[in-house]
Image (cartoon, helix red, strand yellow):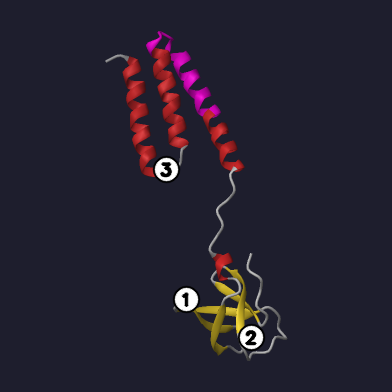
């Protein structure tokens, strides 16, 4: 079997792996492998095939990084929680609380130490798996 067939076979294998992962980096390597195969098909030596493949991998990675950095990042669902009312189940001695929200119990703390522990509370922020509570309903963005 000719060397170009191995290049194209490796490219096809990488495209299959890319379909399983969805990262696009394997696609860049597969395109580079196909370029190496094309160079072999045109009669270039193995060193030129490898150099072309390496340059294509670097160029593809740079292009992919620039494309990804230009796209807006996905927002988290934490913004949807801001402003939602919660039911305080229990206050702890250290000022934290257990609240009921979305069918589960969450750890929570008030936005300030002086905040009263009675009345209706709203979610002001989410810090990891803990909620920050306030008496004033925050504006949702």
Classified by dominant secondary structure, the portion drawn in magenta counts as helix
Outermost residue to the right:
114
Magenta residues, as a range?
41-59
Query: Which residue: 42% across, 43% down?
Result: 22
Q: Nearer the viewer, residue 92 or 71?
A: 71
Q: Nearer the viewer, residue 21 or 134?
A: 134
Among the two numbered marks 1 and 2 on one chain, the one whose residue lies closer to the N terminus:
2
Mark 2 vs 3: CB contact within 8 A:
no
Position in image of residue 7 (x %, y %): 36, 22
Q: Quadrant of residue 114?
A: bottom right
Q: Secondary structure at mark 3?
A: loop
Position in image of residue 129 (x %, y %): 54, 71
Crowd class of label 2 (few under 14; some 14 to 19; many from 20; radius 10 Å): some
Among the two numbered marks 1 and 3 on one chain, the one whose residue lies closer to the N terminus:
3
The residue wearing badge 3 is: 22
Outermost residue to the left:
1
- Is 136 placed above or below 71 here? below
- Is 66 placed above or below 35 here? below
Distance from Cα at disc 2 to Cα at disc 3: 45 Å
Q: Secondary structure at mark 1?
A: loop
Crowd class of label 1 (few under 14; some 14 to 19; many from 20; radius 10 Å): few
- Is 13 placed above or below 4 here? below
The residue wearing badge 2 is: 95
Assess whether residue 50 is covered by the magenta stretch: yes
Position in image of residue 4 (x %, y %): 35, 16
The residue wearing badge 1 is: 102
Query: Which residue: 47% across, 31% down?
Result: 28
């Amino acid at each position: 079997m000719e060397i170009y067939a191995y290049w194209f076979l490796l490219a096809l294998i990488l495209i299959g792996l890319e379909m399983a992962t969805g990262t696009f980096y394997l696609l860049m390597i597969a395109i580079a492998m196909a370029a190496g195969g094309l160079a072999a098909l045109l009669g270039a030596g193995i060193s030129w095939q490898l150099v072309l493949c390496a340059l294509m991998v670097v160029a593809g990675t740079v292009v992919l990084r620039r494309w990804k950095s230009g796209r807006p990042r996905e927002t988290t669902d934490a913004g949807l929680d801001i402003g939602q009312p919660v039911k305080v189940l229990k206050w702890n001695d250290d000022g934290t609380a257990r609240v009921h929200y979305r069918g589960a119990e969450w750890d929570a703390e008030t936005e300030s130490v002086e905040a009263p522990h009675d009345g209706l509370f709203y979610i002001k922020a989410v810090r990891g798996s803990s909620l920050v509570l306030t008496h004033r309903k925050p504006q949702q963005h």
